[in-house]
Image: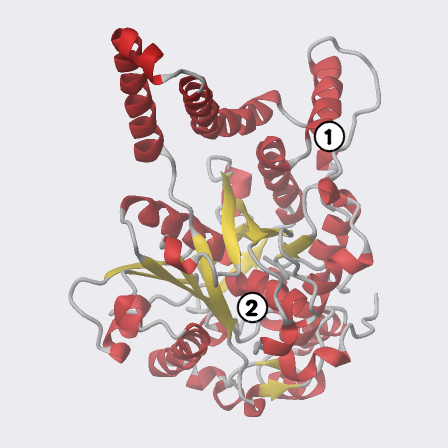
Amino acid sequence: MAQNSPNGEIQSSNLPNFLLSVRLKYVKLGYHYLISNAIYLLIVPILVAVGLHLSTLTLEDLMTNLAMLKSYSTLVVFLGTVYFMSRPRNVYLVDFSCYKPHERYMISKERLVEKLTDIFDESSLNFQKKILYNSGLSDKTYIPVDKWIPSNFSLSSNQHQAKLVIIGAIDGLLAKTGVRIRDIGFIIVNSSMFNPTPSLSAMVVNHYKLGVNVITYNLGGMGCSAGLISVDLANRLLQGQANSYALIVSTEIVSSAFYTGNDKSKLIPNMIFRMGASAVLLSNRFSERRRSKYQLMHVVRTHKGADDRAFSCVFQDEEEDGKKGMSLSKDLMAVAGEALKTNITTLGPLVLPMSEQLLFFVSLIARNVFKRKIKPYIPDFKMAFEHFCIHAGGRAVLDELQKNLDLSEALMEPSRMTLYRFGNTSSSSVWYNLAYSEAKGRIKKGDRAWQIGFGSGFKCNSAVWRALRTVNPAKEKNAWTDEIDDFPAQVSR
């Protein structure tokens, strides 16, 4: 998701101050998730209490109270069975890889403008220049330069680009983990704009000559939040099949989304989106826990598609002359704010400390039930997370989220540097964010990371991870490693 005004500044329709107005039904939904999972934890103390009581009895007591012993044994077996059969499987993030294109695909802002000169009229060209030079992107982002001519935006060129970034990301992941790709049971590929036949997931199967039993999914049209939707799908699949691996590949084929018309609402993506891809390996194997980096704690998905304004705020259509483009509505920022408000209201009860929940809940009840005119309490999400991986959709979006969540420059640094160095890589951008924090040596054991993605539809999705070990940057190799000492860079605001 991306949004800038014609002069590159934030539009008047900024994100609403969503923390000042929340609906009780979304708070209720969050507590419903919490209670649904907490019931499994209640079984453990009961089993422990029964065990402690039995340990105090002598053999003579047990022999004279056979009925009690049978009752306790039946209870232990029953509760143990319920616990082990119904508890969710732990899902671990073994490792991930972000694709870094070859230097021949690197392009400066000046060079990009030169390539656009013969394509657009003066008004559209000037509009795109203003967007580009106020975008927060550097001169080292990547596009398929050799194909960056509309006449070359063919199906075959898009397929070539897709294979380049997808296989590049997967090869990088396999090299890091040492896992044989034939041992992976589930493969999920998400690409919003480019969805050929055969599918991109089928392309992966063909490239690696995988077996007939591999289960594949291809997600299309779901926007920049599709990477976290894929995490949710993988988590659900892994709950149903033990000792398995799931591979998630997130990308966007920028040439397939390039717009050559003169409708300004469709020109912004031309200047923001760039080449990129991520590959993520998840597993529910307990043996993988020791070397895995993170454990998945929560996924919360919010879909506002029932609202017509939300459904159409990011919309692809075709003009009379056959030119296709993705238009961004003036309502985009307001819709995004509403979606995020709903999402974090549901997420809050799952992650916020009890002290924050209590203050927030008391304030909410006083305002909504007793109609008291008091200042609402704004929860401090910095008490729930050490790392914020916000989708690098555009400078304006990051500015507004920083203001509404009251985040420091240090917490926003991974997102701003991802936008600066790699541009908007769509659904893979949250992984470039996390890779930045790893390369900086900031991930410590026990840290919690919050990934936030926005996408067409309109959707806002969150994934929460807990670090299982301290990530040593000296032993890591990722897209940032070779140049991490050059960051953070100074970005004009």
Quarter occupied by the N terminus = bottom right
**Which amino acid lies under the numbered mark 1 shown in the image of this protein?**
Glu
Question: Residue shown at 63%/79% (left/top)?
Answer: 481
Q: Earlier in the sequence, mark 1 or mark 2?
A: 1
Q: Is residue 152 left or right of residue 403?
A: left
Q: Which residue is mark 1?
A: 356
Residue at 81% across, 71% down: 491
What's the residue type where badge 2 is placed? Thr
> Which residue sits at x=76%, y=80%?
486
Taking the image as shown, residue 207 lies to the left or right of residue 147, namely left
Q: Nearer the viewer, residue 319 or 158?
A: 158
Image coordinates for residue 4, horizontal then vertical, percent: 70, 60
Name the quadrant of the C terminus.
bottom right
Q: Position of residue 342 (x, y in %)?
A: 59, 34
Q: Is residue 244 above or below residue 65?
A: below
Residue of label 2? 425
